[in-house]
Image (cartoon, rainbow, N blue to C red):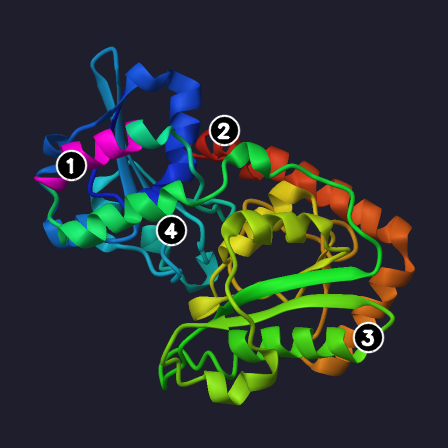
């Protein structure tokens, strides 16, 4: 089996799946090959999708993995491929004519999957031929190398009475209305945790980029960014974690990370599909969108350690079945 990968893919978002392919077929069996995708317009190749082709015994099969925040399907890539995987599939909002190839995947997240020298060698090989701005292209490789390795995402016993949550404060406008959605829901969780102090110790907040016009509305929730390794360590220590649909109501990286870590997840209702439903009280605890509802559910989860352990075990089992790179490739038919 030979796997040809389009090097125009955003390495941050495809790193998760590249690791799966390398683990399955070996490093020599996975090749970056821009020419194999030359029939696709550059505008489509610069999207946040991964495109790869498998070749075996004269047979060829084309795959797309869409990691965009929207559930909307890229029609050009859908027509090009044989299998179209999406981390934000939503069959209820997708025309029937575009569901035959569609596969719902678990949310993934960027990982450092290779040695820095190998990464920069791959980046250097592609930088002279990319249709992306070179600075942006190399920036994707740099950010990928700053991410934790997948092997670091292992379950760990949490610290009782400690809750950590650090997430992005998104820009809001008349189209995405993040201040009424993801920003507000995250702020409600942070404020709910603080109403429970000193009974618990809360750490974290919302990290805003310079010039973010939403910062003034959530000034009481702001926090500084921290290195990914430190954030990961504190997430492992947290008694429970909070999830909510993110930008454009997508499944964010956090949900995938929480599954991999086997965390007790408090979440507002999900907006898009998953390979199988996450069941309230079995895999995840669903809460309302208000500060009062969240505070009540936080107190319930803190008071029932046996319930938290059940959620932790079940969501990690779900991840092993549907979410790992290997499981994701299996869902695609590989």
Local packing at callout 3 (Cα closer than 10 Å; few below 14, some 14-19, many 20+) is: few
The residue nearer to you, when weighing 126 against 174, is: 126
Looking at the image, tell me whether mark 1 or mark 3 is earlier in sequence order.
1
Local packing at callout 2 (Cα closer than 10 Å; few below 14, some 14-19, many 20+) is: some
- Check whether the beta carbons of the residues at disc 4 and disc 2 lie within 8 A of each other: no
Mark 4 and mark 2: Cα distance apart in space: 17 Å
Residue 197 is labelled as 3
Looking at the image, tell me whether mark 4 or mark 2 is earlier in sequence order.
4
**Tag nearer the camera, 4 or 1:** 1
Q: Mark 3 falls on what kind of element?
A: loop
The residue nearer to you, when weighing 79 against 323, is: 323
Magenta residues (range): 118-128
- Whether residue 318 appears in magenta in the rendering, the answer is no
Q: Is residue 133 left or right of residue 254?
A: left
Q: Is residue 76 visible?
A: no
Image height of 90 relative to 6, above or below: below
Residue that numbered label 2 is attached to? 326
Q: Mark 4 falls on what kind of element?
A: loop
Mark 1 and mark 3: Cα distance apart in space: 51 Å
């Amino acid at each position: 089996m030979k796997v040809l990968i389009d090097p125009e893919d955003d390495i941050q978002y495809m790193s998760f799946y590249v690791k799966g392919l390398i683990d399955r077929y070996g490093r020599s069996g996975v090749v970056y090959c821009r020419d194999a995708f030359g029939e696709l317009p550059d505008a489509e190749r610069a999207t946040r999708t991964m495109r790869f082709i498998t070749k075996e015994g004269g047979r060829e099969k084309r795959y797309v993995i869409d990691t965009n925040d929207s559930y909307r399907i890229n029609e050009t890539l859908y027509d090009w491929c044989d299998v179209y995987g999406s981390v934000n599939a939503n069959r209820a909002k997708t025309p029937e004519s575009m569901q035959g190839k569609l596969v719902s995947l678990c949310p993934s997240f960027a990982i450092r999957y290779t040695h820095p020298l190998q990464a920069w060698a791959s980046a250097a090989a592609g930088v002279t031929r990319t249709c992306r701005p070179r600075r942006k292209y190399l920036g994707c490789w740099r950010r990928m190398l700053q991410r934790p390795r997948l092997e670091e995402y292992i379950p760990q016993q949490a610290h009782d009475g400690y809750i950590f949550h650090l997430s992005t404060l998104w820009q809001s406008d008349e189209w995405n209305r993040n201040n009424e959605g993801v920003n507000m829901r995250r702020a409600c969780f942070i404020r709910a945790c603080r109403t429970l102090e000193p009974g618990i110790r809360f750490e974290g907040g919302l990290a805003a980029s310079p010039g973010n016009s939403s910062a003034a509305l959530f000034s009481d929730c702001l926090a500084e960014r921290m290195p990914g390794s430190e954030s990961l360590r504190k997430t492992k220590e947290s008694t429970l974690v909070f999830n909510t649909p993110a930008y454009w109501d997508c499944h964010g990286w956090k949900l995938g990370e929480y599954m991999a870590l086997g965390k007790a997840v408090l979440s507002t209702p999900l907006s898009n599909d998953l390979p199988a439903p996450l069941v309230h009280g079995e895999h995840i605890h669903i809460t309302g969108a208000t500060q009062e509802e969240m505070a009540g559910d936080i107190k319930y989860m803190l008071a029932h350690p046996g319930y938290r352990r059940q959620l932790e075990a079940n969501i990690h089992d779900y991840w092993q079945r549907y979410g790992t790179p290997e499981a994701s490739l299996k869902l695609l038919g590989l």
